[in-house]
Image (cartoon, grey):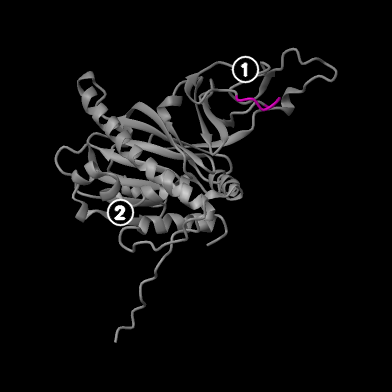
Amino acid sequence: MSLDAPPVQYLNLDPQLYVRDDVFQQERRDIFARSWQFMGPARAVAEAGQYLAIDIAGTPVFAIRGRDGALRGFKNVCRHRGAKLLADGAGSCGLIVCPYHKWSFADTGRLVQAPWYGKDPAIIPEDWPLEAVQIDEWRGLLFASLDPSQTLLEQLGALPDELADEPMENYTATDTATVSFDANWKIYTDNFVEGYHIPGTHPSFYAAIEFEAFETSAHEGYVKMTAPPKPGLFYRGKWLWMWPNWTLSLFDGGMNVSRINPTSTHHTDQQYHFFFADTSAEAAETRAKSVDGTLAVVKEDYTICAETHRNYAAGAYSSGPLSGYHEKGVQYFQTRVAQALGRG
């Protein structure tokens, strides 16, 4: 008689954790504020005055290269009345000037001027610098954190070894795209970290890979999915998801990196950056095939995610079983979420 323990049957996370506003607010504090968030290519802030601005689950932040060469990060919020200072995306500026009341800040975060403020009492600039956030870089990718619970390398876990042979620094960022859907960020992440849904949701993609050889494995800090691609597929056959909310997928001669960013309990933006080794005009068609193909595949997920979200919100679903073969990534992600929220 075998003394081996029977396999554990894991259940999907409590659906109420996907649709309650108080849970989302806790996630903002305990997951998004405490983790490192992918911003974009580090080259976007290579020169003095260049900045990159993003939203982290509702909190706007930016990184800026100072005239002294230092890279700094701040909340993208004026200290006067809370207006947003810089538009999302990449740009360049001298002083950072608030569009609301024209308060201006240096690239060090120091308040330079509060025009027309008056002197009864006068403003003391040293009392009102921009609020700092942490900035770090890994292999040409830029990250920000509001209040990190660990270093960036600690969060990445075993990922550096996974990508050690990938020439990421030789790739140049060429395209960006933001796509949105009406579902909780965890519903989409559950979907991304498994290939079980591919035959039903992505028929063209299913036909372009050897699905019977699709494998999913969970590692420290990330989930890896692999499948042999058939001739003609722009993907190289390896897709990665990293805790808590960013992805990296490989092309021949490039990659895409995305961040799954919730804007509310019921809405999520997915922000893509595309990187290629060959940025010549001759390779434009090949690059466009990878960009357009990626967006076409991911958009096929949004309808099913939105419908699933509505079922959760209606109380029509109770937690079902997770496949021990196909849904190892779901189990890993949901376990990390439960632990972060003190429910593990």
Q: Between residue 93 and residue 313, name the one nearer to us.
A: 313
Q: Secondary structure at mark 2?
A: loop
Q: Which residue is mark 2?
A: 196
Q: Which secondary structure dominates the residues rendered in magenta?
A: loop
The residue sitting at 43% across, 63% down in the picture is: 11
- Residue under circle 1? 99
Q: Quadrant of residue 333?
A: bottom left
Q: Nearer the viewer, residue 276 or 211?
A: 211
Q: Residue at x 26, y 27 (%)?
A: 288
Question: Which residues make up the magenta segment?
Answer: 79-84
Q: Amino acid at mark 1?
A: Pro
Q: Is residue 207 left or right of residue 245?
A: left
When the figure is inspected, residue 114 is found, relative to residue 5, above or below; the finding is above
In the picture, the quarter occupied by the N terminus is bottom left
**Nearer mark to the viewer, of 1 and 2:** 2
Kind of residue indicated by mark 2: Tyr
